[in-house]
Structures are given as C-alpha cells and as structure tokens.
Image (cartoon, rainbow, N blue to C red):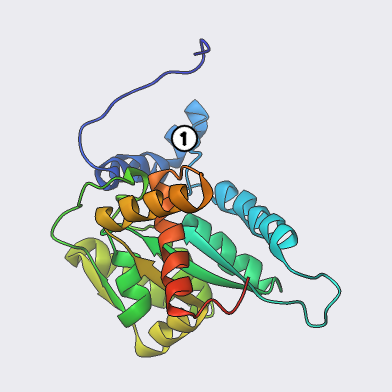
Amino acid sequence: IEDNVHVFAVDGTSDELDEPIRNVFADTEFVKKHNIMSLNSINWARVMVQIAHHFYAYFHCSPSMKETPLPVVEIVVVTGAAGNVTAGYIAQTMGLPIRLVAAVNENDIIHRTIQNGDFSLADSIKPSLAPSIDIQEPYNMERIFWLLSGKDSVLIKTMMEEFQKLGKANVPEALSTKLSLAFNSSTVNDENVIETMLRCWKENQYLLCPHSAVAVSYHYQQMDLGTNSVP
C-alpha cells in the first residue's frame, strides 16, 4: 500500500460507522480545514459517476439503438445504501429507457419500502454472505424521496427527522405509489445466494461473487416464472 493510504478497522456495523461520518461532514469548518471527503455515496460525486454507469450498461445491453422508441432494458442493482439505484433513477429521468430493480439481502428495508411503504428499521442487522449490503439505514433513500416528491424539501426533512428519532417514518400514500411505480425490488437470503452461485457455475462455469448472486437470483426467479420480458 502507498504511503498516503491508511487502513483502519472499526467495531460495529456499517450503519454505526456512517453516524460519525455524517457528524464529521456536518462540521463544515472542520471539513474545509482538513480537506476531508468521502468516496461512498454520502458524496454526491459518487452518485454522479454511477449515472454514467447506467448509460454505459444500457448501450452495451440494448438489443437495438435504431428503434423508436428505444427498447427498455431492466437493470438489477445490488444495493444497501441505495446510491446506485438513485443514480439509475436520475438516469431514467434524463430519458434513459431502463427499468430498475433494487436487489437486497435479508437487510431488506429498501425492499419493504418499495413494496409497501414500510420505511422502518429492523431489530438488528443480519450478517450475510454479501456484507457490503448489510445496511439498514439507506441514506440515499432521502434523495429518492426528495426527487419523487417533486423536491418537497419540507416534507422530506420532516420524514427523515422522524426516521432518525423513531427508527421509522410515515411514507405518504402518494409518495409510496410513485416509489413502487419507479422501482421493483427483490430480497434473498444466504441459501438463495449459495443456490444461485452453484446454478451459475453448473450452467456457465462462471463463479459469481455473493453480491452479484443477489442480483442473478432475481434473474433466475424471473426466468423460472417465465416473466423475463425485457433484456
């Protein structure tokens, strides 16, 4: 590792680590004095870069670029903090014809929120084979709510303050409807992940990582049900 790279281990979950990071960035004078930045999706720059990823994926996966209108491509995003699906939604609003699926493990607050407006913390984080998405406080949902609400800052500020205080927030019915129309979602457990990795290896001789398997599990479900209607 280079001299300017330092590795630190911390106790606790990803959500617990995010709290002091948020507190640091709330102190703007401290941030400016020490030139601090974050490369996770707390940083808007990370989300902006991921917008380009969705366009790149579409151009590679679209069956045709000559049709009018352009064909829809389904993008399954393995997510924990909802940064990449936020990027996908912004790409969608820019005109990219994609259908977004948020794929999560048993830490499923994003799935529950999309499916039935249940934006509430579980009792605890469940350690999984896909630890990068072992998250129960998906801070980018604030950005998605804000965009879907017509940029209603007062409403979203109230919702997020309620969430921080109570561990849950009431999602207005109109906002919940918009959310479920904008996204689909799926949730899998470790058993599903292992089954998916084994199936992919047997059928393709390709070894998936557990995180990729969360998305591919959704793909296999749709194939087995015969509902895979878009690329």
Q: Nearer the viewer, residue 94 or 193?
A: 193
Q: Is residue 113 left or right of residue 149?
A: left
Mark 1 closeness class: few <14, some 14–19, many ≥20 residues within 10 Å: few
**Which residue is pictured at 46% across the width and 35% down the height?**
31
Q: Secondary structure at mark 1?
A: helix
- Total tally of numbered discs in the picture: 1
Q: Is residue 104 left or right of residue 128?
A: right
**Which residue is pictured at 63% across the width and 70% down the height?**
231
x, y percent for residue 216:
46, 59
x, y percent for residue 88:
58, 64
Q: Is residue 148 left or right of residue 22?
A: right
Q: Nearer the viewer, residue 24 or 63?
A: 63
Which residue bears the numbered disc 1? 31
Q: Residue furthest left?
A: 123
Q: Residue furthest top?
A: 3
Q: Residue furthest right?
A: 66
**Which residue is pictured at 30% across the width and 58% down the height?**
192
**Which residue is pictured at 35% across the width and 50% down the height?**
133
Q: Relative to 86, say whether 44 is above or below.
A: above
Q: Nearer the viewer, residue 55 or 148?
A: 55
Q: Residue furthest front?
A: 202
Q: Relative to 57, say whether 168 is above or below.
A: below
x, y percent for residue 23:
33, 43
Q: Can I make out residue 39 in this image?
A: yes
Residue type indicated by callout 1: Val
